[in-house]
Amino acid sequence: MVLRLNAVAGGLLLTLNLITQHVTADAQRNGHRTKQVPGGSTFYLGQERDLWQPLVHIAVHLSQINSIKSTFQLRTYDPEGAIFYGDTENGKEWFILALKDGNPLMLLYRKEVLVHVSGGPKLNDGQWHTLEVSNQGNHVILEVDGVKGLVMGLHSPQLEDVIYTKLRLGLGGILIDSDRVNIQFDPHLDGCIREGSFLNLTIPWELDSETLWPCYPNIQPGIFFPGTGLAILNTTGFLVEEENGMRMELVGDFSQMDGTILSIRSLAKELLFTLAANNETEEISLNLKGVGISLKNNVKNLTITLQKDSMTVFDHENDLTLSKSMQISQANPSIKWRDGHIAIGGLLGNGGDNIGSQFLTGCLEKILIQGKILDLDVAAKHKSISSHSCPA
Ligand SMILES: *[C@@H]1O[C@H](CO)[C@@H](O)[C@H](O)[C@H]1NC(C)=O
Ligand SMILES: *[C@@H]1O[C@H](CO)[C@@H](O)[C@H](O)[C@H]1NC(C)=O
Ligand SMILES: *[C@@H]1O[C@H](CO)[C@@H](O)[C@H](O)[C@H]1NC(C)=O
Ligand SMILES: *[C@@H]1O[C@H](CO)[C@@H](O)[C@H](O)[C@H]1NC(C)=O
């Protein structure tokens, strides 16, 4: 099955990619050290690094290879990201296994032809799956849990087989320029790989970092905030209509949260709105430019609507609606939600230098803004936040 995938190049993604690139550049300047790790280690692919960079990689001579098979286990709730990469002669021919919409996606570039297939079972169900990738002649075959998932081949009898001598592999990223991958996907996968055996190689892999981040033994879907950082988005990306205000739905066990869940700041860096949880007072509080609402923290599903001069919170479980308005005056004009920034997991302060405080500890199962599920992989976010899984 061959699918053509549409490029998702909405304004949101473009805008946020700019911020993300900025963050990535910062990370680059920090410099890296290389360490060696066994290929069978447990790898958390969401570990911080440059966007397309593999977490670990290896280069071998063809004479070192005695198998055509790579097998490993994968566990994720993330629908999209790079898993496994291989190339010959520093990228002359290359192969990528990724996830897109939760399904495996394979790309193969060989003899100046790029083919891609997508399909097979959805893998982002939080369970461990065994994947096997094998290269058989002109075909690459993916098996999932012992069942043939995808087959991809190139048939061009007029082209001769070329014998290569050098092979590189990578996990969680690619080793060629991302411009050469003409299917758009976000490479960062919040997922884990373990028990890998790659072409039956026993030599260690290169890790461009000091340590491997751990994988939690058990996970549940959600965005996990360990209390050390926030994620920032540009409200312009949500195309907020001034007349309809801004609508947000938040799902999670609020009684297990502590800190600022969400805050919104204007382009002029004025704090407009905050939503915070306090596990000592057992309260959830909303604040719209000094006007407050508070409710008990035994809630799991809140819908918040922000208008130019008011806020409403609806608690689905208890079927409770609370509303407050602020006084509009020349000194306190109505709010333009369209031009600003939303922080998830922390407080954006007034003024330029205050990039965040009161970081959230807890798991947000889901956030929808204007009816759209928020994927924090497209936000500028602190490295400690995992975008699709929480420890369970
Ligand atoms: C893997 O390599 C070892 C030697 O390093 C060899 O004994 C074994 O047969 C190989 N396994 C496969 C499946 O090729
Ligand atoms: C937010 O998006 C708007 C429109 O794309 C842009 O003009 C503005 O610079 C962005 N702000 C930031 C901080 O990225
Ligand atoms: C509140 O949350 C903080 C941060 O996670 C935690 O250290 C503390 O133990 C919690 N307190 C209560 C009473 O649950
Ligand atoms: C939250 O409540 C809305 C309205 O009742 C419902 O449609 C939605 O499924 C709920 N979400 C969860 C995760 O319970």
Image (cartoon, grey):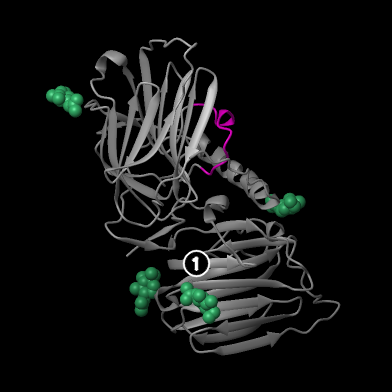
Answer left or right for 241 relative to 85: right
> Does the closest atom of ligand 4 sit within 8 Å of the Cβ of label 1?
yes
Q: Is residue 363 visible?
A: yes
Residue 140: within the magenta?
no
Q: Going 76% across and 75% down the picture, which residue do you hit?
A: 308
Q: Amino acid at mark 1?
A: Lys
Q: Going 63% across and 63% down the picture, which residue do you hit?
A: 342
- State the image coordinates of residue 334 (x, y, percent, origin top left): 80, 75
Answer left or right for 9 relative to 187: right
Instruction: List the residue tagged with mark 1.
Output: 366
Looking at the image, residue 375 lies above or below residue 157: below
Q: Is residue 226 visible?
A: no
Which residues make up the magenta segment? 176-186
Q: Magenta stretch: dominant SS?
A: loop
Q: Going 75% across and 73% down the picture, which residue do you hit?
A: 244
Q: How many marks?
A: 1
Quadrant into which the C terminus falls: bottom left
- State the image coordinates of residue 166 (x, y, percent, origin top left): 37, 15
Looking at the image, residue 99 lies above or below residue 350: above
Answer left or right for 359 relative to 142: right
Say which element carries label 1. Answer: strand
Between 378 and 332, the one nearer to me in the picture? 378
Quarter of the view holding residue 314: bottom right
Residue 185: within the magenta?
yes
- State the image coordinates of residue 37 (x, y, percent, origin top left): 27, 34
Quarter of the view holding residue 298: bottom left
- State the image coordinates of residue 27 (x, y, percent, origin top left): 51, 40
Between 62 and 298, the one nearer to me in the picture? 62
Q: Going 38% across and 57% down the picture, which residue do you hit?
A: 125
Between 16 and 103, the one nearer to me in the picture? 103
**Disc 1 packing (10 Å; few <14; some 14–19; many ≥20):** some
